[in-house]
Image: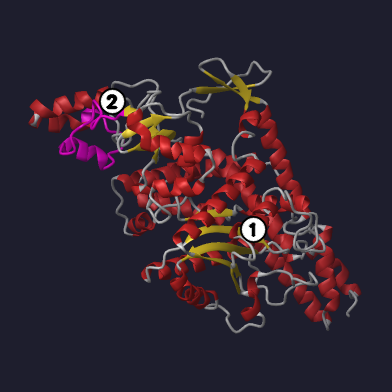
Amino acid sequence: MPEVHPHDNEWLNKQLYGVPEVFRQEIMADYAAKDTRREANMHVLAERTAIAAVMGKSERFYHINLNDRDCTQAAKLHSRHVLRLLANNPRLNLAALYSLIADFIKSQGIAPPHLAERILKAIEMSHIAGYDAIKVKGAINRAKDEQWWRRKLKTKHIREGETLSRRYNQVNRAKGIYISNLGLGKIRHRWQENQSFLENTIATNEQGYSASLAELSSLNVSNPSIRRQELMVRTRGFEECCKAMGHQALFITLTCPSKYHRSLSKSGSKNPNWNGATPLDGQQYLRRTFERIRAALGNQNIGIFGFRVAEPHHDGTPHWHLLLFVEPNQAQALLKVFRRYAFEEDSNEPGAAKHRLKVEEIDPSKGSATGYIAKYISKNIDGEGIDQDLYGEDAKDSAIRVRAWASLWGIRQFQQLGGASVTVWRELRRMEAIQAAELDWIESIRQCVDQGDWQGYTEQMGGVFCKRQEQVIRPLYEQVQEAKQNPEAIPETIPGNPEHSRNSPEMAPKTRPGTIPESSETLAGIEAGIPGSGPDEFRGLAESNAGTTLDVIRDLQEIPAIKTNRYGDEALTRLKGIVSFGVEIITRVHEWTLSQAESTNRFTLEYCQ
């Protein structure tokens, strides 16, 4: 165990300047464990390089700021830099501009705005047109926006701190289970800010009813208790579907290879096989593996339905629990597919056969399928009905840390596999009984929902394997229209969803008044995504085809403009109700405005529901 050489004191202090004490202690503990002075000093240099890599900086970083940071100033500087890039390169085409800006965004350690693979290939070929051009412009507009930068920088900052905490083994059963104490404090602070905003924001509808957003959010699945109860109802309904169909229930646990785990499970000490992976890397591995499993099952016509729960090991590395229902004669083929892909990576490492994939065939005589997954649902939401978690910690405290872990890393905890739409389920719960006899099929489904009968609801919606677009009832979305129409502007796209303001169900018309026939040449040009389309763009066409084209332009000007997001690349839509065989029922009949409580500085938000 080498002691710090007198000649190394000044150099060592310089290298570790700005490193928090909790990290410094871990570095020095490893320093003392090295055999020679040279190995110890090289270890310090390697750790400094690793810290710089996590922070997205060169080795000349000054300090590590682990406190919650205001990213407003940095966001302003980055957005202005993007504006300068655009101003200094007026001759570049759209593809070149996006590539230039994307490189700058990557240099700040942030992923550029997501674009489809098809659009990225078009950028490489420098050939972007139509709708693709609108998407690329939206990505550039995001890079110009201070708020977009601020959100990305805050997420990057909190994940950098948690990544370093895991590197220096602050996330384990002995120090900070599931999430570091530092990360938990940041997430709790974020929750408090959000709760304060909800409590101080008042929603008022056109009838004068007012309530705070905190009160309204406590009435839906934002409330952990309601969320847990709904998941339990859906799980029990799937189990009843399984019994009715004669299927078999399997409980499968899928775990990441050793290199994704930071700490050893029993002692909490550092795992020598860890390769620096974050929980997001582990989640990506699990998603990638399951995508391949589902593709293979689809190729073999093996149908499954059920639920997936993602939860952390003690060191924050995710693993999945899957409650799957399958035909008994397909169960072995399903398990064969799971084994193939679960052991495809690092299959020969010690412990892989024991821990990588666990399968339990649920025997109804010994326990229900819902009972198998109930504790995992509870301990990942609020810990209700559980005394201790797997590691002996209080279940309610652990549930808070698990939710904070999922929030910090952006990991989806629960996913339904197959079955009917839960959005329709929630919309039907908003409805009262339908008196019209001609809509008895909708009322029958609504009664199942009102009674909490997920099995009956699923069967009447088309069954567990029915595709969403083929289900009896689907969500009804409406594109938001601009409040005021500019007579000089012609919309670039025609709304695809009909607009309605009815409060009672009735048959929807086959065509909406004011729509343009699909054969219209002008419509084809507009749908191609002509930016800034207006009457001048159509002047030449109108002169050559004055009889019909001018009428089309006049009709277009009568259609209300579609409201888009702030970046102009996506039409805003709102959920209005449900639609079934052409019958549309509006379940969200109120228009809400938001205002700040106890303040004269008021603001409004249209179409809040």
Residue 326 part of the magenta-drawn span: no
Q: CA distance from mark 2 to mark 1?
A: 54 Å
Expressed as whole percent of the image width and height from the top left, the position of residue 396 reads: 76, 50
User: Mark 2 = which residue?
Assistant: 559
- Most foreground residue, 183 or 326: 326
Depth check, front residue: 290 or 8: 290
Residue 572 shows up from this direction: no
Residue 418 against residue 587 in the figure, above or below: below
Nearest the eye: 10 or 429 = 429
Tag on residue 208?
A: none
Q: Is label 1 in a helix, a strand or a loop? A: helix
Residue 511 part of the magenta-drawn span:
yes
At label 2, the amino acid type is: Ile
The residue segment tinted magenta is 507-536
Q: Which residue does the image show at 60% across and 65% down from the upper left?
A: 282
Badge 1 is on which residue?
371
39 up-or-down from 411: above or below? below
